């Protein structure tokens, strides 16, 4: 790892390390005033409706910040984020760490001095407002600190679309390209979500159950996604006509094929939004990456991406020439 990357990784990891230490110190300091069973789940009104053993609470919450911090470091170092997008990613890490630490700390505070077996304290909703405020301040601090470490430069900056691969088409010739993409985990994930939604429903929490059911339908709809390149541009649609993602030709500057790391570049799988880029990511591997005229990128992982990107460049040229 270069010295610059070491500085970037340190800056990305620092908020999660600090948040973890604060949470651990807070728990140790308050342990004697906490009941053996903590209120660990609250409904929309802030009343406790779920409890967890104190030791289990620590084992469940302690890894959250370190694991998330490790993912954030991976994205900062290997995520192909450049310039302003890189600084936003770093600042976002500070905001996320501060938000989580405040919420976890507030959950401990509301359990203070609760008698064993007695009614648990409530979680006032103003805590969430404060948590967002703390996150905004921490994010601003992270953005300022990010200026101390030079952001990586985009190797494609200033390179026009001239050098991109193309498919030669005769005048008046029409062409299109289509592939289906998916991953084994999408139907499994939908099944797990459906079971979880049913469990929440039977437990009386239909707010969460309904939300998870909607998410289940979205996952099922995109369990097999169709990627199309034609005169309309780059389109990604699921098993149903809607929802769909479409990037029209007039908004595309050029297209490339490249290997994408799902976790490092997008922080996971599914439809992802990151500073300077969006993407439909079902796995790590080859992808069509369309650079838009505003500088943002849209990526979709799909086989035979080289052919799709080459045809997209040809169609963009035609559209630009008014043909």
Image (spheres, grey):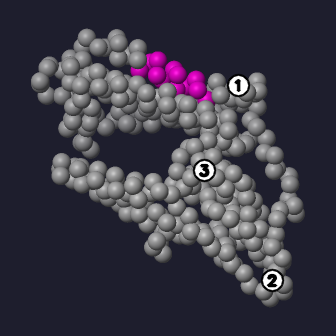
Does 173 sit above or below residue 62?
below
Counting residues from the start of the chain, the first of labels 2 and 1 encountered is 1
Q: Nearer the viewer, mark 3 or mark 2?
A: 3
Foreground residue among 223 and 152: 223
Question: Does residue 308 belong to the magenta stretch?
Answer: no
Q: Quadrant of residue 186?
A: bottom left
Q: What residue did someone put label 1 on?
A: 6
Along the horizontal axis of the image, is 296 left or right of 320?
Answer: left
Q: Which residue is mark 2?
A: 323
Identify the element where label 1 is drawn: helix
- Kindly state the secondary structure of the residue where label 2 is placed: loop
Total marks in image: 3
Of residue 234 and residue 138, the one placed in the foreground of this image is 234
Magenta-drawn stretch contains 21 = yes
For the record, the magenta segment spans 12-23
Label 1 crowd bin: few (<14), some (14–19), many (20+), radius 10 Å: some
């Amino acid at each position: 790892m270069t010295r610059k990357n070491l500085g970037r990784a340190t800056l990305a990891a620092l908020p999660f390390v600090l948040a973890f230490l604060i949470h651990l110190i807070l728990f140790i300091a308050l342990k004697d005033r906490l009941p053996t069973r903590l209120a660990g789940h609250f409904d929309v009104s802030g009343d406790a409706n779920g409890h967890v053993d104190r030791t289990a609470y620590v084992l469940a919450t302690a890894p959250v910040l370190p694991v998330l911090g490790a993912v954030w470091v991976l994205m900062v170092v290997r995520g192909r984020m450049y310039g302003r997008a890189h600084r936003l990613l770093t600042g976002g890490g500070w905001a996320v760490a501060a938000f989580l630490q405040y919420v976890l700390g507030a959950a401990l505070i509301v359990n203070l001095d609760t008698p064993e077996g007695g009614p648990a304290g409530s979680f006032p909703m103003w805590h969430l407002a404060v948590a967002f405020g703390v996150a905004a301040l921490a994010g601003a601090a992270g953005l300022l600190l990010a200026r101390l470490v030079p952001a990586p430069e985009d190797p494609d900056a200033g390179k026009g679309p001239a050098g991109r691969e193309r498919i030669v088409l005769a005048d008046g010739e029409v062409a299109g390209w289509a592939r289906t993409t998916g991953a084994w985990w999408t139907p499994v994930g939908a099944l797990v979500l459906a079971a979880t939604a049913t469990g929440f429903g039977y437990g009386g929490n239909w707010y969460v159950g309904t939300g998870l059911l909607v998410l289940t339908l979205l996952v099922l709809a995109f369990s097999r996604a169709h990627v199309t390149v034609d005169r309309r541009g780059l389109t990604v649609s699921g098993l149903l006509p809607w929802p769909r993602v479409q990037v029209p030709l007039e908004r595309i500057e050029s297209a490339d094929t490249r290997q994408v790391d799902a976790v490092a570049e997008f922080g996971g799988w599914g439809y992802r939004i990151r500073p300077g880029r969006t993407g439909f990511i079902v796995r790590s591997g080859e992808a069509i990456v369309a650079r838009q005229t505003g500088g943002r990128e849209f990526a979709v992982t799909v086989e035979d991406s080289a052919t799709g990107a080459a045809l997209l460049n040809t169609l963009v040229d035609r559209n630009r020439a008014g043909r």
